[in-house]
Image (cartoon, grey):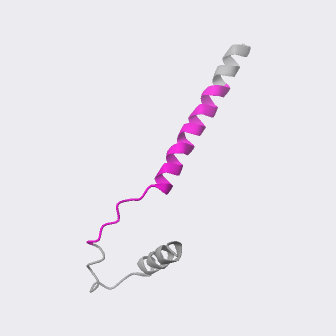
Amino acid sequence: MLDFKLKLVLTILSSVLFSLIFILLALVLPTGYSTQTEAKKDVPQTRFQKMSQGMRKGFNK
């Protein structure tokens, strides 16, 4: 019974660690922001797009 509990705890911990690694990778790796979207300067921007650009400029300082 003790062996089963140990295996269960180790399985849960390893799955949590595995999922956290992939979540961190998704947040850290670039998404492939293309320059084609920068060429569309004539299109009016939404509030979310303006906030996103401001955050990008702030992080790149």
Q: Is 23 inside the magenta-drawn segment?
A: yes
Q: Position of residue 11 (x, y in %)?
A: 60, 27
Q: Nearer the viewer, residue 3 or 26?
A: 26
Q: Is residue 46 above or below residue 2?
A: below
State the residue at coordinates (56%, 44%).
20
Give x and y (percent) for residue 41: 29, 84
Residue 55 shown left or right of residue 4 in the figure: left
All told, the count of numbered labels is 0
Q: The N terminus is located in which quarter?
A: top right
Q: Position of residue 21 (x, y in %)?
A: 54, 44
24 or 1: which is nearer to us?
24
29 vs 32, left or right, is right
Percent of width and height locating residue 54: 48, 79
Residue 17 falls in image quadrant: top right
Picture layout, residue 23 above or below residue 49? above
Q: Residue at x 44, y 77 (%)?
A: 53
- Residue 28 versus residue 13 in the image, above or below: below
* Stretch in magenta: 9-36
Residue closest to the eye, 61 or 7:
61
Above or below: residue 32 compared with residue 54:
above
**SS majority, magenta:** helix
- Toward the front, the furthest residue is 61
Residue, far right: 2
